Amino acid sequence: MGFVNFLVYLAIMMGIYAILSLSLNLQYGFAGLANFGQVAFFCLGAYISTIIVLVFKMPFVFGLLGAMIVAGLFGYLISVPTANLKEDYWAIATLAAAEVVRIFFLNEDWVVGGGPYQGGSFGIGGIPQPLRSLFSAHTYPFLYLAIVLVCLVATYIIINTLTQSPFGRVIKSIRAGDNLPQALGKDVKGFRMKVMAIGGAFGGLAGCLWAHYHGFISPNQFLPLETFIIWAMVIVGGKANNKGAILGAVIIMIFYYSTRFLKDYIPIEEVTLASLRMVVIGILIVVAMLFMKEGLIKEKKTDY
Amino acid sequence: MTFTQVVLNSIVRGSELALLSMGLTIVYDILKFANFAHTEFAVVGVYLALFLNVALGLPIIPAAIMASVATGAFSIIIDRAIFKKMRNASGIIIMVTSLGLAIALRNTIRAIWGADAQNYSVALQKPIITEYFRITPLQIWIILVGLTAMIAFHLLLHHTTLGKAMRASSDNPELAQASGIATEKIITWVWFIAITFASLGGILIGLETYILPYMGFAIIVPVFCATILGGIGNPYGAMLGALVLGLAENFGLYINFGNIINLGGILNFSQELLIPTGYKPAISFIILILVLLIRPRGILGKKKEG
C-alpha cells in the first residue's frame, strides 16, 4: 500500500469516525446521556444500507437515507424505557442493546438474503460502491473521501446549528439535572428521545459510509470496543464542543492506525499489539477524566 | 432436559451471579456510581488464579483464595490511585472513568495471557447422575460457595460494627461522617469485600466453563441486570435478582412458547416455539428492559427521591 493511499484511507476513517464522535458528543457532551452502545447505530446503519442496496438493488442514496431513518428510529426506541431514569441505567441499557443488535445479525442470516458467505457470522461481501464504474481503482478512493467529507461537513453544520439553537440550550440544561428544564415546562423525556434519535441517525450514516467503502461487513466488526474508541475521541477532544469531537477523532485515528506499523519495527504479535493499543485507549480515558476533564478544546460557555 | 435439571442449572448460575452482583451493589450503594470495571476486576482474579494454579502448580482451592484476596487488595490500590481523586465528582464522571479502567484492565490481561481460551488444571470430575438430574461436584461447590458468601454477607451487614457503619454511610453519608464514622475506611473495606467476592465468582465461572480475557464483558450485562432487578444498592436484592435471572436464562430456553400461545388447547398452534440458544445472552437484556419499564427500582428497591 503506497503512502498516499494510506493517507487517503486514514482520512476516510477519520471522517467516518468524526461523524460517530459528533453523534456521541451530541448525546453525552451536550445532553449528558451516557450511551455505551454507540456501535449499535454504526452496525444498524451498515446492515440496513447493505440490505437496501445489495438485496433490493436500490441506489446508494436510498441506502444512506434508509440507514439514517432506521438507526434514528432505533435510537428513539431504546430511549423509551430509560428516558425518565438516571444515567447509570442509560449506560447499561444501551450497552446491552448494542449487543442484542450484533447478536441479531449474527444469528439471522436471512435478513441479507441468505446463501453461503452471505450473512450470519460469515459476513456479507460484494457491497456495491457508489459511482464505482466511473472511476479507476486508483482515483476512486479520492472520490469516496469527497463523499465522506461532504457527509461530515453536513453533519457538523446540522449538529452545530442544533446545539446553538434553543434546542441545544434545553438539552444542556437537562445535562445539569431535570429540575430546571422541568420548572420551565420542558418535556425532558421528549428531548432526551429526540437527542437519541438524531444521534442515532448520524451514527447510521457513518455505518452506511463504512459498509460501502469496505464492501464487506460482518458482526465481528461491530464489537463494543468500537464504542469505547468513540468515547475516547469525545473525552480527549473535548466534550460539548463539536470541533473538539472532530479533533478527538483525528488524534485517536492517527494513534490507532500509525501503531499498526509498529510491528514492522519491533517483534510483537498482532494480538498483543491490538491489546496494547486498547490499553492506551483505556488509560487515555482515565487520565483525561482525572486531569483534563474538559478535553483538548473546552466547551464554549455563553452567558445569556 | 428434565425440569429438575433446569432448576438445578438455574441455582448454579444464580450462585455465580450473586457473588458478582452483591459486590456491584454495595460499591454503588457507598460510592454512588455504577462500576463498569467490576467484572473486569473479577477477570484479574481469574487470571491470577490461573497463574497460581497452572504456572506455580498450586491446588485450585488455595489458588482461588489467594488470587481473590490479592485482587481485593489490588482494587484498593486502584481506588487510591483513581477513584479517591473523584469522590465529589458526579456519578456519570466516575462511571465513564470506570469504563476506561475496564478497557485498560481487559486488554492488559489479553496482552499478557493471549486471547485464547484456557482452563484451570483440575482433575476431571465424575458427575453424580440420578433419574432426575446430573450434577458435578464442582456445581455443588458453586452452590455452597454462593450460599456461604450470602450468609457471610448477611452476618457482616447486621452483626459487625463495619456492617452497621456501612449501612449508616449508605443511608446518610454526611450524618455518618458527623457521627465519627471514618468514611474512607469503610470505602476501603467495601472495595476489598466487593472485589474479593467478584473474583471468587469469576473463578467459579472459569472452572465451570473456560477462561477468556473477554469473559468479564460477557457477564457484565447479566450482573448489572441481576443488580437492577433486585433493586440497585440492596445486597439482598442482588442475591434475589441473581437467582431470578438464573431461572430466567435457563427456563427461557427450556419453555416451549408454542404451548403458551395455544392457551391450553384453545388455539391450535402446534408448532414448537423455542428461543434459539444463540439468543441466550439477549435474555438478560430483555429482562433488564422490562424491569426498567415496569419497576426501575427493582423488586426490593427502596423508593428514593428523584
Image: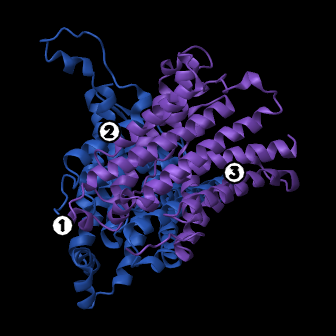
Chain colours: A purple, B blue
Split into 4 quadrants, where in the image is the C terminus of chain B?
bottom left
Q: Which residue occupies the foreground of this view, A4 or B178? A: A4
Circle 3 packing at 10 Å, graded few (<14), some (14-19), many (20+), is some
Q: Kindly tell me whether residue A18 is visible in this rendering.
A: yes
> Image point 30% across, 67% down: which residue?
A177
Q: Which residue occupies the foreground of this view, B223 or A171? A: A171
Classify A116 as above or below A235.
Answer: above
The chain letter under disc 2 is B
Residue B289 in the image, given as x and y percentages of width and height: 30, 43
Q: Amino acid at mark 1?
A: Glu
For marks 2 and 1, give the CA distance: 26 Å
Q: Secondary structure at mark 1?
A: loop
For marks 2 and 3, give the CA distance: 32 Å
Residues at marks 2 and 3 touching, judged by CB atoms closer than 8 Å:
no
Query: Which residue position is annotated with label 2?
Result: B286
Residue B238 in the image, given as x and y percentages of width and height: 28, 56
Q: Secondary structure at mark 2?
A: helix
Query: Which residue position is annotated with label 3?
Result: A274
Residue B154 in the image, given as x and y percentages of width and height: 24, 65
The chain letter under disc 1 is B
For marks 1 and 3, give the CA distance: 45 Å
Q: Of the numbered discs in the image, which one, if any, rests on residue B305?
A: 1
